[in-house]
Image (cartoon, helix red, strand yellow):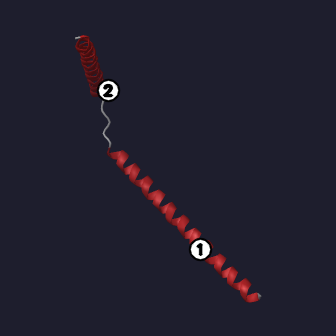
Amino acid sequence: MAEEEKKSAEISAESSEKKSSKKDKDKIKKQSFRKGVRTEFKKITWPDKDSLTKQSVAVVCVTVVVSVAIALLDFIIKYGVDWLVEL
């Protein structure tokens, strides 16, 4: 009986050591990831206000032009198909 208790105590001690070593490895991985993210954020060059404004205006203009082109194509195709069906 004493031997069985001793073995179960050894097994539980080994499993708790494995769990704690896994937690340590996870903690090290998280710290490494955070350090990498911090390093990459330091490399970012943020645009100044003027270039940001110019780029935003360009994006809005291109979006408007493309949406108008798509609307015109849709209109032409719609009435073109209707015209063909009536023939």
**Quadrant that contains the C terminus:** top left
Residue 23 placed where, x, y %?
55, 64
How many residues crowd mark 1 within 10 Å: few (<14), some (14–19), many (20+)?
few
- Is 65 located above or below residue 29 in the figure? above
Indicate the amino acid at tag 1. Answer: Glu
Q: Which one is earlier in the sequence, the residue at label 2 or at label 1?
A: 1
Q: Is the residue 13 above or below the residue 34 in the image?
A: below
Nearest the viewer among 69 and 6 is 69
Which quadrant of the figure has residue 48? Answer: top left
Task: Name the element at disc 1.
Answer: helix
User: Residue 84 at what x, y percent from top left?
Assistant: 22, 14
Q: Residues within 10 Å of mark 2 (few under 14, many from 20)?
A: few
Q: Residue at x 73, y 83 (%)?
A: 5
As rendered, which of 37 and 50 lies closer to the eye?
A: 37
Horizontal side of residue 61 vs 30, given as left or right = left
Q: Residue furthest front?
A: 87
Nearest the eye: 76 or 38: 76
Q: Is residue 15 left or right of residue 51?
A: right
Where, by quadrant of the figure, is residue 80 drawn?
A: top left
Query: Position of 85 compared to 33: left or right?
Result: left
Q: How many marks?
A: 2
Q: CA distance from mark 2 to mark 1?
A: 55 Å
Read off the residue under disc 2: 49
Amino acid type of the residue that numbered disc 2 sits on in the rendered structure: Lys
Query: What kind of element bears circle 2?
Result: helix
Q: Which mark is residue 79?
A: none
- Labels 2 and 1 touching (C-beta < 8 A): no
Q: Nearer the viewer, residue 51 or 65?
A: 65
- Residue at 32% across / 36% down in the picture? 46
On the image, the x and y values in percent for residue 4 come to 72, 85
Residue to which mark 1 is pinned: 17
